[in-house]
Image (cartoon, helix red, strand yellow):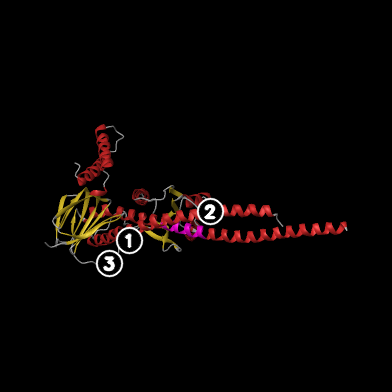
Amino acid sequence: MAGVRDIRRRIRSVANMQQITKAMKMVAAAKLRRAQEKVVASRPYAKQIQDVLGRLAQAQTDTSHPLLEQRLVKKIGYILITSDRGLCGGFNANLIRMTRGILEEKRDADTGLVTVGRKGNDYFNRRKAEIISRFVGLGDNPDYNQASKIADEVMGLYTTRELDEVYLVYSKFISVLTQEPTMVKVLPIEPSDEKVGGNYIFEPSPEEMLEKMLPNYIESQIFSALLESKASEEGARMTAMDSATENAKEMISKLTLVMNRARQAAITKEISEIVGGAAALE
Amino acid sequence: MTTFNLNVVSPDGQVIDKEVEFVVLPSVDGELGILANHAPLIAGLEAGVMRYTEDGKVYKIAICGGFVEVAKNKVSVLANTAEKAEKINVERALAAKERAQKRLQDKSPDVDVLRAEMALKRAVARLKTTGKL
């Protein structure tokens, strides 16, 4: 059995860790709140742009915009959004596992990744998967300009026919406890079929409007995904740190028990030695 | 006076959602005024100042490009950014304006003229909104 002093040292080190995980949990909780607010705030814009785009696509008979063009799929691109930092439970692992599954499934086709976030990038880099471009170090507050940069890159790849289909793989924020890895199609854009009345006046022409609006739509989709992913990450981190703190607590109480037992055993041993020694003298 | 619903959203969130009497927007083809019961319309917007009248008072918002949709007595503005006058950082806008002007005057080949012009337009829109220009 380990000595009392060794056990005491271990308890101290576990207690230190507990303090750290507790602090991290609180930081994650604060960041989560902010991220959640941003997710909610971005929703009206995303919804509106989708609605308006639907109306626009309907008004226009000629849908020959390069971003709407459906072609024979030779190469598929996946935008994988992961976090830059770890210590967030299964957050990145879940996304990576899903992506691996998809890549495995599409083994016969040509595939390429656009990685956003260090974790996914590092993993697939090690695995020698094809990474077309990477965006790392986006920070805690994803902003619209970052989404726009990613969107520009992806749209460029699509219009130059480097990629024929683009999907977005990210973690959807459902609640603090649940985050769901999700895949959505980004390109080519498939206009919705909902019927809306009214003959719109377009200023400038529908073609020009479409030209302006489609990139915005992609940007807003990526922006929403970035925000959802950030909220999911902080949610996952908070849960992970909470259970780490719990585990540390449990471990401390177990170790304390062992230590007390060891101390008692030592005392008993000492007494019996004294008694034995005294008996030998008689 | 008849009113209609004005809803301004940007990727950072909803800016306003209220009943107004009159809206003027910086559309790509010039200023665009909208009163109640306007015909359905979808238009592109440029960086500039939008004004709306509520209870006879005029308010301003700086916007940087986007779209507007008018339908069923509802005006939805989808702006890339939208800032109310009180939220604008005047010093930053002034600095941005000077920087853009300087770059435009430079005429050196590595100046992205289009970008500088856009930046200037945005800065001017912000300053006009606060009434500092």
Between residues B53 and A156, which one lies in front from this camera angle? B53
Identify the chain of the residue marked 3, using the numbered disc in the image.
A
Identify the chain of the residue marked 1, using the numbered disc in the image.
A
For the residues beneath circles 1 and 2, the answer to whether they share a chain is yes
Which residue is denoted by mark 2 in the rendering?
A19
What's under tag 1, amino acid-wise?
Glu
Q: How many neighbours does mark 1 have within 10 angstroms: few (below 14), some (14-19), or many (20 or more)?
A: some
The residues bearing labels 1 and 2 have C-alpha atoms spaced at a distance of: 50 Å
Q: Earlier in the sequence, mark 1 or mark 2?
A: 2
Image position of A234 with respect to B114: above or below: below
Residue range in magenta is A231-242
**x and y percentages locating residue A69 in the rendered image:** 32, 56
Describe the element under mark 1 as helix, strand or loop: loop
Q: Residue at x 67, y 60 (%)?
A: A260
Q: Residue at x 63, y 59 (%)?
A: A256
Q: How many neighbours does mark 3 have within 10 angstroms: few (below 14), some (14-19), or many (20 or more)?
A: few
Between residues A57 and B72, which one lies in front from this camera angle? B72
Please indicate whether residue B109 sits to the left or right of residue B59 in the image.
Answer: right
Between residues A93 and B49, which one lies in front from this camera angle? B49
Please say whether residue A59 is one of the residues in the magenta stretch: no
For the residues beneath circles 3 and 2, the answer to whether they share a chain is yes
Describe the element under mark 2 as helix, strand or loop: helix
**x and y percentages locating residue B46 in the rendered image:** 22, 49
Which residue is denoted by mark 1 in the rendering?
A190
Describe the element under mark 3 as helix, strand or loop: loop
**x and y percentages locating residue A202 in the rendered image:** 19, 57
Which residue is denoted by mark 3 in the rendering?
A194
Asked whether the viewer can see residue A145, the reply is: yes
Identify the disc placed on residue A254: none
What's under tag 3, amino acid-wise?
Glu
